[in-house]
């Protein structure tokens, strides 16, 4: 990624979770930090999220999950990205994430986990530090 190019983030709400206020606020914070944000809207399938991420050539795929289904959703997304040769995209998740699930998410391949209450500065800093492709 060249220094002139903005970090591109796809922010998605998978499944039937209809709570998107947090995702919209995070999207705004990432835009304020100079990132380009593509928000997919509500009720996205994991397959469509992976396809959109590849089509948009993003650096980061961010999921906002409030439903408690973060483990199977993340497992499926990381698997699809790997299958499609796009596992160089930084995958992050935020929302209602119990502390006990953080190591499991990291084992799956989710690099950033941001439970509710995480500061915007922490999210932005993590993405800036980890989003460059090798």
Image (tube, grey):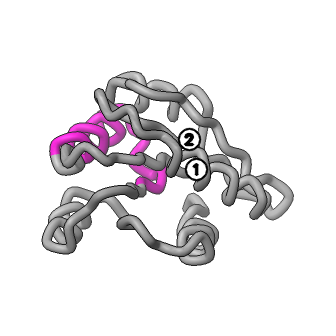
**Residue 17 location (% of width, % of height):** 32, 34
Residue bearing the label numbered 1: 59
Residue bearing the label numbered 2: 10
Q: Which residues are magenta?
A: 72-91
Q: Is residue 113 above or below residue 44?
A: below
For the residues labelled 1 and 2, the Cα–Cα distance comes to 8 Å
Name the side, left or right, on which 87 lies relative to 124: left
Q: Is residue 113 above or below residue 87?
A: below
**Residue 131 location (% of width, % of height):** 57, 62
Q: Nearer the viewer, residue 41 or 5?
A: 41
Identify the image quadrant of the N terminus. bottom right
Label annotation for residue 9? none
User: At 29% from the left edge and 58% from the top edge, which residue is drawn?
Assistant: 96
**Residue 38 location (% of width, % of height):** 63, 37
User: At 26% from the left edge and 62% from the top edge, which residue is drawn?
Assistant: 97
Q: Is residue 55 magenta?
A: no
Q: Is residue 99 above or below residue 5?
A: below
Name the side, left or right, on which 49 lies relative to 37: left
């Amino acid at each position: 990624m060249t220094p002139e190019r903005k970090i591109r983030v796809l922010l998605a709400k998978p499944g039937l979770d209809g709570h998107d206020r947090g995702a919209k606020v995070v999207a705004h914070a990432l835009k304020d930090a100079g990132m380009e944000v593509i928000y997919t809207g509500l009720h996205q399938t994991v397959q469509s999220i992976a396809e959109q991420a590849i089509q948009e050539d993003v650096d980061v795929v961010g999921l906002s999950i409030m439903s408690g289904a973060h483990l199977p959703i993340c497992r499926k997304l990381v698997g699809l990205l790997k299958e499609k040769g796009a596992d160089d995209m930084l995958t992050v998740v935020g929302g209602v994430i119990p502390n006990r699930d953080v190591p499991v998410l990291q084992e799956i391949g989710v690099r950033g986990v941001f439970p509710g209450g995480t500061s915007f500065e922490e999210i932005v800093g993590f993405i800036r530090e980890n989003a460059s492709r090798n």
